[in-house]
Image (cartoon, coloured by chain):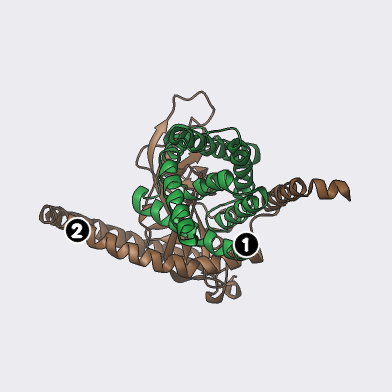
Amino acid sequence: MFYYLSLPFLSILLVILQSTITDVFFSGRLVFELSLIVIIYAGFRLDLIRGSILAFILGFVFDCVAGSVPGLFTFIYVVIFLCSFFASGRLATEKIYVIALFSFFCAFLKELMVILFYYSAFKFDVLINMYFVFLPQALIVGLFAPVFFYLMRRVEVSLYEKAV
Amino acid sequence: MFLLRKYKTAIFIVTLLVIAVIMFSYNLKYGADGSFFGKVVLEAVAPAQKVLSASVTSVKDDWLRYVLLVGIEEENKNLKNKINEFKATLILYQEGYLEAQRLRKLLSLTDDYHYHFVSARVIGREQAALSKTILINKGTTHGLKTGMPVIAPPGLIGRLVDVSWHASKVLLFIDENSNVDAIVQRTRMQGIISGAGPRGLILKYISKTQDVKEGDVIVSSGMGGVFPKGMLIGQVSHVDRQDASLFLKINVAPFVDFSKLEEILILASDEDKIK
């Protein structure tokens, strides 16, 4: 129960942290998608119910704070969670290159969904952003995901040791 | 009942996806006017974002102040020269302004709308793919409403899209979702300014036969009644006539650096005074 109650607060903190890091290091040109890495991690580690609720709430908070079409990221985050959940059974998720490549793939999939949405809803030709925005962003996610996974594993191990 | 129990996880996930689809379909059709939960999230984000932004900004400012000291003397000299040039230009403009005031009186022209400014501080810059918004520390309790135009001198920067009680979300012009009716100041040619994310702005629907040059100033047209007429938006940075389409491909550089916004003004319309 504590997990579900703390989710909205943790999601808000995560989105704030993400926007601050983005603002400090990339001056708004690129987005450091920490929330997406968390969703991928949740897909590898959590069960379907817990993970999908996390993805839904995180997506909703992200939509409220940063999105211009509320609901879009809520949908995308749940889809990304489902992708990583079903992929986790078939991939060697402890290997660094698998984490990096899969995170890159998920980030790219997310951008593709956004492009498709903008194209079908507003007829915007946003493909030009592919090389300057989407690919670099997906690369950042792919590069940082192994670091995040490593840090989270350390936290999990230390928590487990304390409990024992 | 057995099926329901067997597939309860799948049903739950499909329900979540359906709720998300309904949410963005509804917002697409009726516009994002801010749900109650959305307002609550904005209210919760504002104070935490304010504290984090303030501490990060102070560290950043101290560091930049130190870095900027290098070469400040040279810059100071250049700025003084520029001030002298601007003073001369300002005198010319003052003359023009006074003349315009006299002519306006003669022609009995009056503004259609009355605005008053509400100043606000930027407490967060939120970036998602193709979406550029900022959070400010004022909301409905300060008289703000969805749709009000936002300016950061010298020009317009966007409009309010989500207003909670003590915080609001501003959709910036560079957001791909943003479209504003605008005119080229020199030729009075009308077009649509659309956001292009990191590439700035794009002026659309200007025919290839029209005369648009680099350096032309783009101002709001006042059409649609959201933005007042004649407010600065940007300057033409590149005109492409080679494209096969019927219209020019015009890139516009905004007057405002959107990554450095700190304080902004909201043009709150005084509806009682509308003539």
Q: Residue furthest front?
A: A164
Numbered badge on residue A4: 1
Name the secondary structure under disc 1.
Answer: helix
Question: Closer to us: mark 1 or mark 2?
Answer: 1
Which colour represents chain A?
green
Left or right relative to B74: residue A19: right
Contact? badges 1 and 2 (CB < 8 Å): no
Left or right relative to A139: residue A57: right
In the rendered view, would you say B209 is above or below B99? Answer: above
Q: What crowding class fits label 2: few (fewer than 14 Cα within 10 Å), some (14-19), or many (20 or more)? A: few
Q: Residue at x 65, y 66 (%)?
A: B36
Q: Nearer the viewer, residue B22 or B160?
A: B22
Which residue corresponds to mark 2? B83
Q: Nearer the viewer, residue B80 or B126?
A: B126
Name the secondary structure under disc 2.
Answer: helix
In three-dimensional space, the C-alpha distance between marks 1 and 2, rounded to whole angstroms, equals: 59 Å
Q: Position of residue B161 (x, y in %)?
A: 57, 59
User: Which chain wears brown?
Assistant: B
Chain that bears disc 2: B
Labels 1 and 2 within one chain? no
Q: Amino acid at mark 2?
A: Ile
Q: Position of residue B235 (x, y in %)?
A: 38, 45
In the rendered view, would you say A90 is above or below B18? Answer: above
Chain that bears disc 1: A
Q: Residue at x 67, y 53 (%)?
A: B27
Q: What crowding class fits label 1: few (fewer than 14 Cα within 10 Å), some (14-19), or many (20 or more)? A: few
Q: Residue at x 65, y 41 (%)?
A: A121
